[in-house]
Image (cartoon, rainbow, N blue to C red):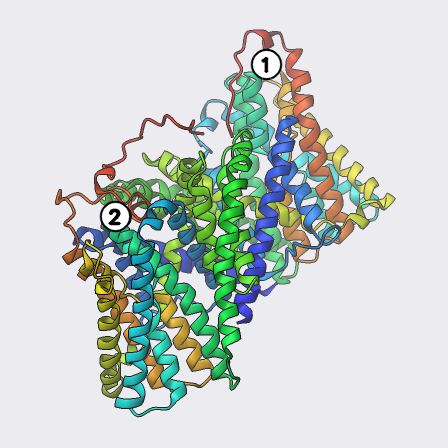
Amino acid sequence: MTQTQSFVQLLLVLAAVLLTTRSLSALAEKFGQPAIVGELVGGVLLGASALGILDPNETAIHMLAQLGLLVLLFEIGLATDLRALTTVGGTAAVVAVGGVVLPFALGYVALSAFGISGMAAIVCAATLTATSIAISTRVLAELGFLHTREGRVVLGAAVLDAIIGLVILSVIATFAAGAAITTTGVLRAIAVAFGFVVITLLAGRYIVPPLFRAAKALRSPTTIAVLGMAFAFALAALAGLLGSSVIVGAFVAGVLLNGIQQREDVLGFAAPIGSLLTPIFFAAVGASIDLRALVEPRTLLITMILLAAGVIGKLIAAYVPVWFKGNKALVGTAMLPRGEIELIVAQTGLAIGALNASLFGAITVMVLLTTLLSPTLIQAVARRDPRARELMPVKLVR
Amino acid sequence: MTDSENIPHLLLVLAALLVTAKLLGALAQRVGQPSVLGELVAGVLLGGSVFGMLDPTQPAIHALSELGLIVLLFEIGLHTDLRSMAKVAGTATTVGIVGVVVPFALGYWVVTGVLGLGELAALVCAAALTATSIGISARVLSDLGQLKTREGQVVLGAAVLDDIIGLIVLSVVTSVAVGGSWTAVGVIRTTAIAVGFIVVALTVGRFLAPPVFSSIETIRAPGTLAVLALAFAFLLSSLAASSGSAMILGAFAAGIILNNTAERVEIERAATMIGHLLVPIFFASVGAAVELSAFRESGTLAVAGLLIVVGVFGKFVAGYAPWWFRGNKKLIGVAMIPRGEVGLIFAQMGLTTRAISPSLFSALALMVLVTTFLTPPILAHIGPRAPKSGSVPDDIGIDDLVSGDWGHRTPRRVPVDDSHPTD
């Protein structure tokens, strides 16, 4: 009977989480901010440092949050068109790699100078690498710059960033099991993570389309959509069992299904499930924040270091491809927004004990600040571009 | 963080469950059976009896399947028009009460008189015989497009009533089984809470929900409406359970309340998608709870046979109890037969409190299994024929549950959506 009682409790927590995150993200969007801000703040309110309703370590909540994360990565994958890389591939690749390496190196050096070293510094530096595809794309689209050269470079670089970020995450997760951090160990983990992505993407291109063409015989779009979700679960499980991160599998599954005919059906199925489960993940991240650790001066200082390292690194990376004749400042600022992946990395770091409450808090505040500030910054840079008046804004609903 | 390594395993189970349930569901539809049958069979296949992959008592699976049940009941509620239900209230009450009293009395008599077992075992068996699986009944009826007919409304009303009565019986039998005594006051209290909950929730909700949800409508963020509607369902379910009534009562009431809001269609669309993911987990869990090994013992089989006869007969006559009703009584009687998860809950309770022997538990489980599995094909046989077009209807699953209209189920080719912009 205790199982029933705890389930009743779970329902109440879920209701509270959904009500709070939804109202706060509606409020955030009213002020032109991404919904994720509202969800994080909602989590902070419900978490141990304020109301104490939401315990992110509770088994069922943890499981639902993980599922929400998977569905989110699946959705991101579904929206990721690898063909975006082909036209501006070289420039995008340079911006992406530069945008990973420079913030990582800057962050690592700055933190080491500050007396933080080892795994903690690596995890913190890793949270500076990825760009939030969702936020960048949305802001650029609203300004009409999505289909310019700059837009394509940002999109391509953000896609590569996400893949690199996920590989970094897998590497970190490998050492979660307590494996000793050696050079060969790191190289092996990178090889496994990259190998998984490359092999599944290559093999999947030949296997997935015929499979889903055959599934048309079922003559039911919803059934095919459910099968698409099951495919994501299966690939995620495979990635997890091979020692990579489950979310890598979900992302790759989404990328693979991006090319099938029934993509819209799968997307239409995943979206409502994501809107139910994904806020649970971000609320759980918010609930893991210890507000008391945040007000310490040391935490604030670390936040500033991380913020500076991330911004400088990303901006410089945009100027690395010297041959690119577009608006480099725009590319640089558009690469600034952080979002899901760094929070996932931070969450993993917290779970494996590499981060303490203070560092975790610093990272989440850094992510919040970049998310809050970068849309305004991108707008300011874009308005000074001579083309700003001619381009037609595209309003994306998501 | 031991559960972090369980996540890949859980995902593997979920993937296998969804693929098997959906493919078998499609197969079932193709041979003219409701798709829920395929999902139940998928559960039996993946469960402990065959592959041993799906363990319905595992906390994560349990939570997901219970969420599935709540979404299912919420959807049923969304499609329950209180006015058409009120028209058949008398009939439904009669069917519900007779469908409890006859199987209970017959079951009690069979276990004490024929099998010569004790009073406690008889109480558990008799109680397990009273249940009606509202999930399976409603799902089968909607698979056949009968949910919105008068017969469908009678079955739905009677099944809800049976759930409430079942709850009362369960609490009474549990207190007897653990050695306590039960009082008339306790029975009346449980009844009053259940009835009071529905009345209060519906009255308050009818006034509050339409203005609240139409103000939510003004928030143009996609998915907000449906997520908040589900949050409302979770809230009411939890309220129902903590006020001492059944969880599913809350989910059902939440659906009924939102039935007359202007935003119903949009809520339903998203809830349906979520249901497509979670409801198969519920039905597969019901299937997975079945022990196939019980089939091998002849003694168990004989007892199970007796219980099955009582179970089928008791519910079937209930369909004929409202003599004044001029509908398809056979349909009502058959639709009341499946015991489903509710019957299993009783059997499980009896086993854990040692009120019944493992062999008797297997017999009860077999009774539940047979009544659950027999009903869909029988209903499909006696119910109105579905148009034989050779094509599998487009929306398998909860859509049939909610559409309840075969004509509605033309293959969906990117519908021209006038009510809401797609994202």
Residue drawn 68% across the image and 41% down it: A41
Label 2 crowd (10 A; few <14 / some 14-19 / many >=20): some
| Image-based side of B316 in relation to B262, left or right | left
Q: Residue furthest front?
A: B324
Indicate which label's residue lies in the foreground, 2 or 1.
Answer: 2
The residue tagged with tag 1: helix, strand or loop?
loop
What chain letter is assigned to the residue under label 2? B
| Image-based side of A108 in relation to B339, left or right | right
| Image-based side of B401 in relation to A147, left or right | left
Residue drawn 33% across the image and 69% down it: B51
Residue drawn 27% across the image and 35% down it: B412
**Which of the numbered marks, if any, corresponds to residue A325?**
1
Which quadrant of the figure contains the C terminus of chain B?
top left
Q: Quadrant of residue B421?
A: top left
| Image-based side of B285 in relation to A69, left or right | left
Identify the residue position indicated by label 2 in the image: B149
Above or below residue B291? Residue B201 is above
From where the camera sits, is residue B359 visible? yes
Label 1 crowd (10 A; few <14 / some 14-19 / many >=20): few
**Which of the numbered marks, if any, corresponds to residue B211?**
none
Residue A55, given in percent of the width and then of the height, sits at 65, 57
Residue A44, given in percent of the width and then of the height, sits at 70, 46
